[in-house]
Image (cartoon, rainbow, N blue to C red):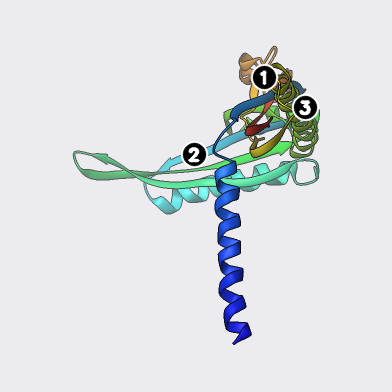
Amino acid sequence: MKNVIIVPLIVLITFAASVASSDELNYNLVNLFGAAENHVDNDLLAVTMQSSADAATAQEAAKMVNQEMNWALNLIKDSAAIKKQTINYQTRARYQNKVIIGWSVSQQLRLESEEIDTLSYFIGPLQEKLQVISMNFKISPNQKKDAAEALISEALAAFEKKARLVSQVLRARDYRIVTLNIAENAPAIPLQRGYQVEAMSLSSADPPQLEAGESTLAVRVDGTIQLIF
């Protein structure tokens, strides 16, 4: 019988404590945010190139594209610094008066490297058979991680500074954090200097003249504090 009596009491006490704790968080609440940003040098070059071919049959067009892709991959196979990936393979019928008159096949080659000069060197020769679709600079994952960690510390410090200021001005004894959210995936904003698109028209023997520039990384901390009087 003693066990039967004790269990309901424990449940009631726990429930009462939970309600009291919930009520305590319903007043003296202040929403704050802290933010930090920094310009970070881009240290990774990403290039997407494409091979495309038209032929009477899909097999013929595919063969031409496969040959060009094999040629391109063989050209850069000894460069371990370049990350290689074939993507977006497509086969499309070409119509005239609702009748198939041929086939088009295309495939893209995505290249990435932190050795920008090395990848830039290969862009020229690769254009002998492939077309540049896009080229952009980014922050490498490792550098982005290190920069984000530093920005989180700065944003948290800014949040704490605001919390203490609010507490002081409103004459609170102290404060406690009720909720806190860290948004460290703010988009990187590229600030590229001197990115020369016209270099893509150079001869296949000439590497394009590129400048990596910077990107802006930002971290924001949003939260709620409760003032203690």
* Residue at figure coordinates x 64%, y 26% from the top left: 33
State the separation of the CA atoms marked 3 and 2.
53 Å
Mark 3: secondary structure: helix
Q: Position of residue 114 (x, y in %)?
A: 78, 34
Give the mark nearest the N terminus, 1 or 3.
Answer: 3
The relative height of residue 65 versus residue 150 in the rendered view (above or below) is: below
Q: Crowding near pointer 3: few (<14 within 10 Å), some, many (20+)?
A: some
Read off the residue under disc 3.
Answer: 157
**In terms of depth relative to the viewer, which is nearer, 27 or 107?**
27
Residue 52 circle label: 2
Quadrant in which the C terminus is drawn? top right
Quadrant in which the N terminus is drawn? bottom right
Q: Which of marks 2 and 1 is in front?
A: 1
Please give the count of numbered marks on the rendered protein.
3
Q: What residue type is labelled 2?
A: Ser
Mark 1: secondary structure: loop
Residue 25 circle label: none
The relative height of residue 3 versus residue 139 in the rendered view (above or below) is: below
**In terms of depth relative to the viewer, which is nearer, 213 or 175?**
175
Q: Crowding near pointer 1: few (<14 within 10 Å), some, many (20+)?
A: few
